[in-house]
């Protein structure tokens, strides 16, 4: 029965092809607008993600003590600290692959011959080095007592402490191939100093975190800090400066960040930045999708008007169908199928036009990207304010899910717009319909 009603609805639409084309054209425009605007946000999001780092950096979360008011109203005196107990709690968060606590050496300077300079010295557990995703260009990636790993730029800002005036200048020092020591000065102001001899076991490859730092076994750093401060460390209440958490996958980063914040800590890093970026593009997608939806709303009025006119023109036909046994439900079904088909035809045409325009625009932008000077400040597409070279000019990204959503949306718009005219047709009295002129 439904197949017969569908066949009848199709024949009715084909009787007024011009009207079908014009009405479906409105749906086409709306569907195309929705698809292209959302596809633009998807392309921009991919370009932004490609430019902020590799997958390793996107699974890192930097955890700090939240020195503001905590989420549960903690005061600065009782907010959670990065203690060993907190480290144990972090390990238990679902989706956590590694918890890497760090602490910094307090004060001190590195001395290489007559040159000296301050270097950020970070203590870390050598067993957790593989989770940092770092490598060495010289030496070995090992960190035993008395050894250090030097960043590629750790010695860039050394100088002669005796130089003054015009003779002062910074001198880069290769700390891996140049023997150096670390001088410590206590907080008590006694003027004493302690000289530490260290051996560079490896020189780190360029990375996003430790280029200007020295990595040292965390037990060495804690021991040296005890000497500097004159205070013995309690292993149970010791507070780390920072904790680096590695999530198991990029998809779990947001869940881990939320769990950390619920515990009262501050979460940051590239993984957290990616969460904020995704939230921004989700909002942008809703806004631009709404703009495209306005075009579909206008098309809905066109569908409603077309169906209303069709009912007025076919009033006698409706009366005749009812006179020979058609029920209100049959009439309603016929006109709803017609309205849905108008939306479906417009949606299919809109999806096809969207893919056509996507290919044209992306090919043009790809050609523009290839013609741009690779050494320019903004490689990729020269007239856009961001680097699109890493996505090959694919500024518009139409996913299969987006196409299916747009098709269902267009069909749904047709059905909703045709609902009132269809109900009006179904409720007609046969005698009155047959008497109409």
Image (cartoon, helix red, strand yellow):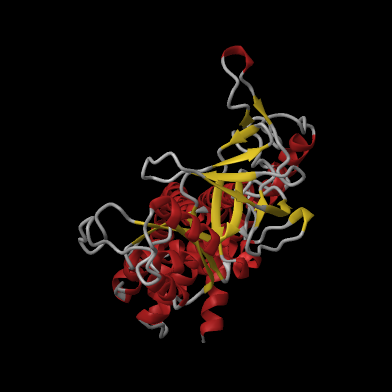
Would you place residue 359 above or below residue 434 in this image? above
Let me know if residue 193 appears in the view: yes
| Rendered image quadrant of residue 55 | bottom right
- Left or right: 295 as drawn, with respect to 45: left
**Numbered marks: total:** 0
Q: Nearer the viewer, residue 208 or 14?
A: 208
User: Looking at the image, can residue 40 be seen?
Assistant: no
Residue 46 screen position, x and y as percent: 61, 52
Q: Position of residue 301 (x, y in %)?
A: 39, 52
State the image quarter where residue 417 is shown.
bottom left
Towards the viewer: 91 or 383: 91
Q: Residue at x 50, y 43 (%)?
A: 193
Of residues 412 and 158, the one drawn nearer to the viewer in this rendering: 158
Position of 321 relative to 281 (above/below)? below
Who's the residue at 35% across and 68% down the image? 237
Taking the spot 38% from the left edge, 62% from the top edge, the residue there is 232
Q: Quadrant of residue 154?
A: top right
- 247 or 407, which lies in front? 247
Q: Is the residue 316 above or below the residue 163 in the image?
A: below
Residue at (60% x, 20% y) in the render: 163
**Quadrant of the image for the C terminus?**
bottom left
Question: What percent of the width, then of the height, locates residue 241?
Answer: 43, 56
From the viewer's perspective, tell me whether residue 40 is left or right of residue 356.
left
Q: Position of residue 88 (x, y in %)?
A: 43, 75
């Amino acid at each position: 029965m439904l197949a017969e009603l569908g066949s009848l609805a199709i024949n009715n639409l084909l009787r007024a092809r011009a009207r079908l084309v014009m009405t479906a054209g409105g749906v086409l425009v709306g569907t195309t607008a929705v698809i292209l605007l959302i596809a633009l946000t998807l392309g921009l999001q991919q370009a932004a993600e490609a430019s902020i780092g590799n997958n390793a950096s996107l699974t890192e979360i930097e955890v700090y003590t939240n020195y503001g008011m905590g989420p549960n109203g903690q005061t600065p005196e009782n907010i959670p600290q990065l203690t060993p107990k907190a480290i144990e709690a972090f390990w238990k968060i679902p989706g956590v692959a590694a918890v890497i606590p760090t602490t910094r050496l307090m004060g001190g300077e590195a001395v290489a011959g007559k040159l000296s300079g301050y270097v950020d010295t970070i203590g870390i557990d050598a067993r957790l080095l593989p989770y940092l995703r770092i490598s060495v260009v010289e030496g070995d990636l090992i960190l035993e007592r008395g050894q250090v790993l030097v960043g590629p730029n750790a010695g860039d800002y050394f100088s002669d402490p005796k130089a003054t005036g015009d003779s002062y200048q910074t001198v880069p020092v290769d700390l891996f191939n140049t023997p150096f020591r670390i001088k410590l000065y206590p907080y008590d102001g006694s003027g004493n100093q302690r000289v530490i001899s260290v051996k560079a076991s490896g020189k780190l490859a360029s990375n996003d975190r430790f280029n200007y730092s020295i990595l040292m076994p965390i037990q060495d750093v804690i021991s040296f800090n005890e000497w500097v401060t004159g205070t013995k460390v309690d292993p149970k209440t010791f507070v780390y400066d920072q904790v680096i958490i590695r999530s198991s996958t990029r998809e779990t980063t947001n869940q881990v960040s939320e769990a950390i914040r619920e515990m009262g800590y501050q979460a940051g890093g590239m993984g957290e930045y990616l969460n904020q970026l995704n939230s921004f593009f989700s909002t942008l997608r809703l806004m631009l999708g709404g703009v495209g939806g306005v075009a579909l709303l206008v098309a809905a009025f066109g569908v409603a008007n077309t169906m209303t006119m069709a009912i007025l023109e076919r009033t006698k036909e409706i009366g005749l169908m009812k006179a020979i046994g058609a029920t209100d439900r049959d009439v309603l079904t016929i006109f709803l199928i017609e309205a849905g088909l108008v939306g479906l035809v417009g949606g299919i045409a809109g999806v096809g036009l969207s893919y056509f325009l996507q290919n044209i625009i992306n090919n043009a932008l790809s050609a523009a990207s290839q013609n741009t000077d690779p050494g320019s400040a903004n490689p990729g597409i020269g007239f856009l304010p961001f680097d699109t070279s890493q996505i090959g000019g694919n500024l518009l990204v139409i996913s299969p899910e987006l196409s299916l959503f747009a098709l269902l949306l267009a069909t749904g718009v047709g059905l909703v717009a045709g609902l009132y005219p269809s109900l009006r047709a179904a409720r007609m009295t046969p005698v009155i319909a047959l008497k109409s002129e």
